[in-house]
Image (cartoon, rainbow, N blue to C red):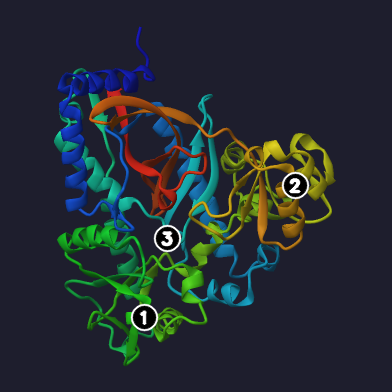
Amino acid sequence: MTTDSDAPLAFMRQHFGNLEELGDGCGALADQIRDWMIEHDVVFADHAIPFVMAPHCLDVPTLDRVQHAVEVLTRVLDRFCTAFRFDEDLRRALDLPPAEADLLRIEPTLDDPLQLCRLDAFLLPDGSIQFLEFNAESPAGIGYTDVMYDGLRQHFPALRDPEGLTVEYQPLTGHLIDTVRDVEARWRMWTTGPQGPGRSLGIPNSVERPHVVLVDTADSPSVPEFRIICAALERAEFTAGYASLDALTRVDGRLVANGAPVDVVYRRALVEDVLDPYASPGAAALIAAVREGAVAMFNPFPARVANNKKLLALLGAPAFAHLLIDDEERRIVAECIPWTRVLATGGSSLPGGGAGDLPSYVSANREALVLKPASDYGGHNVHLGKLTDQSSWDALVFAHAGTGNWIVQQYLEVPIGRFPAIEDGRLVVRDRHFNINPFAIGGKYAGMITRISTEPVINVSAGGGLLPCVAVDFT
C-alpha cells in the first residue's frame, strides 16, 4: 500500500533511471543545463548559481502544513511590524538605533507592511517545521528559482510527463506581480484622494503602464535576478528597470529613475544601505519621497521589524501576548519557533521551564546553542556551538552579552538530504545540508525554494546552491 509520502521517492526513482540511461552523457547534459542557466541570468556575483540535477521533491501533505504555518506566522509578523509604529514596549524591546527606528515609522501608505517575506526553516525528520529566521528586507530567489525550474523542466522528461505521478511547481513571480499591482493601486488611490499629496505632485489618478524600479546598491551581486523580474513586470504591462540608490533623484517632488517618475519602488537595498552616512543623495531622495507619499514602496521600511532576529525572542513573550490573537497563532508560534533569547546579562527563562543566569547557561551549554547577530544577513557571523571551541565561544558570549545586538538560539541538527550531481561526467548522489525557504507574498503563501550546501550554515552568498521545490503526488 502506497502513501502520500511515497510519491517523491517514486518520482526520484523515475528521474534517476532516466539519468542512468544517459551514462556518460550525463556530463554533457549538466554542461548544457549550466550554459542554459547562465544564458537565462541564473547568475549571482558573476557566477552560475550551483544547482543539482533534480528539484527538491516533497509530498502534498507536507507542503500543506508548510503553507498553513507560513500564512499564520505572516499574519503575526505583519502585526508586529505595524505595532512598532505605536507600541513603545516593542520599540524598547527591539532597541534599534534611533535613525533606524525613525525610518521604520514613516511609511504612510500601507497598513500591512509585510508584503514580501522569505521564512527560512528546517523540515526535520519527524515532520516538524522550525523557522529559524525571517528575511523581510531583500529576499532573493524568486526570479532565479522560477527560471531554474523552467530549465530543469526543459531538459528532464520526468518533470514534464512523470509516469503515474503529478509534479507541481508553484511559480513565485506571478504572486510578486499581483502584489506590485495591488500596492501601486492602493498607493495611487491614497495619494490622489482628498487628503493625499498627489494633486500638488502632479500624480495622475491612473497610468497605462506604472513605472516600477528595483532599487539596490550599485555593487549588488543580484542584478541578473533583477533583469529576470523586470522582464516579467514588462510582460505584465509595467515599465520596469533597475536603479542603484545613487541614481535616484527628486524632480518637482517626484522620485525619478531612468529618466522617468517612479510609481513603485521594489526595495532590495537594505536599511543600513539607505541610512549609510556615506551613501549618495539618492538615498535621501528615496527617504523623502516615501515620507511624503510621493512613491509606493515594498517592502516598506516597517517590514524591517520582521527581519530583526530579536523578534524571534519576542513572538512568544508574555509582554507581547496581545499581538497573538487566537489559539492557532499561539500554537504555531509555540511549535514552530525554536527557543530564542536576546543575549542579555542576568536571569532568563531557560529551556525546560527553569530559570537562571543567561550568559552562564549559554557558556555551559555550548553544543546545544547557536549565536547570531540580530541584524546581520547572508549567514555572516553565525556561530554553531558544536563547531566552536569553548574559549572562542566564551569570548563571543561575554563580548556580546548585554549589548542587545546578538541572540542565542536552540541548535537544531541541520537536515541532510541526498541529491544527484554530476562529478567528472558521472552521476553521483551526495549528502547535502538543506533548508526550506517558503515565501509569503501579499500575505499569502506563494511557493518555496530549497537551498543546499556542503556546510551546515547554508547561504547562496556563501557558495550554497539553489533549487526549486515541487509537490509530487500520485495521479
| Depth order, front residue of 452/115 | 452
- Between residue 56 and residue 49, name the one nearer to us: 49
Crowd band around label 3 with a 10 angstrom C-alpha radius: few (<14), some (14–19), many (20+): many
* Residue 138: assigned label: 3
Residue 325 position in % (x across, y down): 60, 49
Q: CA distance from mark 1 to mark 2?
A: 44 Å
Picture quarter with the C terminus = top left
Outermost residue, top side: 1
| Residue 435 vertical placement versus 383 (above, below) | above
Percent of width and height locating residue 266? 34, 67
Please tell me whether residue 159 is drawn above or below residue 69 in the rendered image: above
Q: Amino acid at mark 3?
A: Ser
- Category of crowding for the residue at label 2, using alpha-carbon neighbours closer than 10 angstroms: few (below 14), some (14–19), many (at least 20): few
The residue tagged 2 is 391
Residue drawn at 74 percent across, 53 percent down: 395
Amino acid type of the residue tagged 1 in the rendering:
Asp
**Can I make out residue 192 in this image?**
no
367 to the left or right of 10: right
Q: Residue at x 46, y 61 (%)?
A: 137
Q: Which residue is mark 1?
A: 246
Under circle 1, the secondary element is helix
